[in-house]
Amino acid sequence: MMHKPFSFLSTILAASLLAGSTVYAAPPAPIQHEHTAPAHADHQITKRTDAENMYNTIQFLSQAPRVAGSPEELKAVRYIEQQFKSYGYHVEVQPFQFEGYTAPSEVTLKIGTEKKEGEAFTYSPNSDVTAELVYVGLGTTADVAGKDLNGKIALIQRGNISFADKVRNAAKQGAKAVIIYNNTDGKLNGTLGGSDASFVAAVGITKQEGDALAANLRAGEKITATVKVAGAEVKTLTSHNVIATKKPDANKKNTNDIIIIGSHHDSVEKAPGANDDASGVAVTLELARVMSKLKTDTELRFITFGAEENGLIGSKKYAASLSEDEIKRTIGMFQLDMVGSKDAGDLIMYTIDGKKNRVTDLGAAASSRLSGVLPYGQEGRSDHESFHALGIPAALFIHAPVEPWYHTPNDTLDKISKEKLDNVADIVGSAVYQAARPGELVIEPIDYPRRNVELQN
Ligand SMILES: [Zn+2]
């Protein structure tokens, strides 16, 4: 799962509440199923999924961080490719280029002469500037209009628009650096989403520090700040997606449908990424292994994406490579991201618009047959976004709230729960198999609640 790019959830929530709508595209009218009963079908999955296999995958992948474009990410790509091939799949490795970012070796923030803690935003350029600090609210075009920021440092609050737009707006008015403060508790270390020649250095600070500075500036105090970012570097790198395809078993009753099961194999810097997202890759591989032994009437694509942490770049590239026909035929995308931590909460399905869809219906039905109620909520921040953008029903399967080790060097194998891996593989596997096994797709109408658990406490 990637860093929060900006605070947009409240806006979207407000919009969907106004619309007052929980309606979604319903599947075609049910036709009676003449084949195996769901319980028996689920058993085809649950008796085969093996937590040891998934644990071993995580053990291999989490030996080192797998930053997009690094040799370690490529090693993961080759491993995943080999595993898929060993299950008998046709595998495509899809390379793509992106702008990689080497984090700065030094970030210094001073208010007057006092050193403060600041985090450089990903894709912040280097700079060394000491200048007057000017408060510009949320940093919208309206906020900066008419403000003299020439050669100065802008103090901006997080919220409403992206970090990148805040930095661009301030830079356009002449600011030489930007300090953005959080609108919630905790450190602020976000991303500007990609490199841009118009960016100036951008550093994040806490809400507490920011509120105090803003109050003093509003009271007329003159404050001088220093923002130094050194050693950061942007360069063109290559990452890869790995795609294993299972064509429907030869039969004239085959559907023309495609289902995608996805996860991401890259991690952030310094994090071994055992849960984020070696766990999702492990479940993807295990479901590919299990499905290779079963007859299906629907095309299955098992995909691990690269450069997810850099802004869902791999899944966007893959989505852009799909033809109109493939998009029309894709009836669901199941994204598995952070699905094995002992220290995270319960499983939830998140959609981009906060509405139920075919994927959540299938997931909730499978869960109710196997292990109980599975709620849904609204969140992006993973590769399901790239498919929702194409109009494909998509959902993120994740345990929420996420563990305290998220994006830290402590995201290691010892925090992995085999029971959780097994449970997620059984639910998602049974959900996919309900749609992909031979016979008409009938989704049993069940109630499942909306539960908007914040991913991070
Ligand atoms: Zn992540």
Image (cartoon, rainbow, N blue to C red):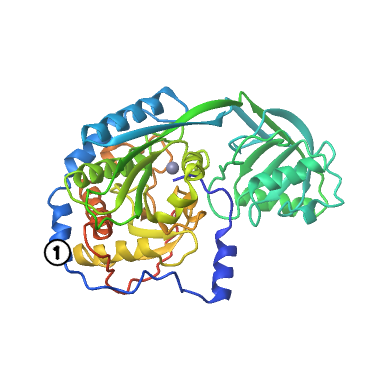
Q: How many marks?
A: 1
x and y percentages locating residue 119 in the rendered image: 59, 37
x and y percentages locating residue 150 in the rendered image: 85, 39
Q: Nearer the viewer, residue 285 or 188?
A: 285
The answer to whether any part of residue 374 appears in the image is no
Residue 333's place in the image compared with 363, above or below, is above
> Which residue is disc 1 drawn over?
36
Q: Nearer the viewer, residue 208 or 12?
A: 12
Amino acid type assigned to the residue bearing label 1 in the image: Thr
Tell me the quadrant of the picture where the C terminus can be found.
bottom left
Q: Residue at x 24, y 58 (%)?
A: 253
User: Is residue 136 left or right of 234 when viewed as pictured?
Assistant: right
Residue 171 placement: quadrant: top right
Crowding near pointer 1: few (<14 within 10 Å), some, many (20+)? few
Residue sitting farthest toward the bottom: 20
The answer to whether any part of residue 419 appears in the image is yes
Residue sitting farthest toward the front: 252
x and y percentages locating residue 165 in the rendered image: 69, 47
Residue 240's place in the image compared with 255, above or below, is above
Q: Residue at x 67, y 28 (%)?
A: 126
> Cβ(mark 1) to ligand 1 < 8 Å?
no
Q: Nearer the viewer, residue 389 or 440?
A: 440
Residue 67's place in the image compared with 344, above or below, is above
Q: Nearer the viewer, residue 245 or 151?
A: 245
Q: Residue at x 45, y 48 (%)?
A: 382
**Disc 1 on helix, strand or loop?**
loop
Residue 376 placement: quadrant: bottom left
Quadrant field for ligand 1: top left
x and y percentages locating residue 417 in the rendered image: 24, 46
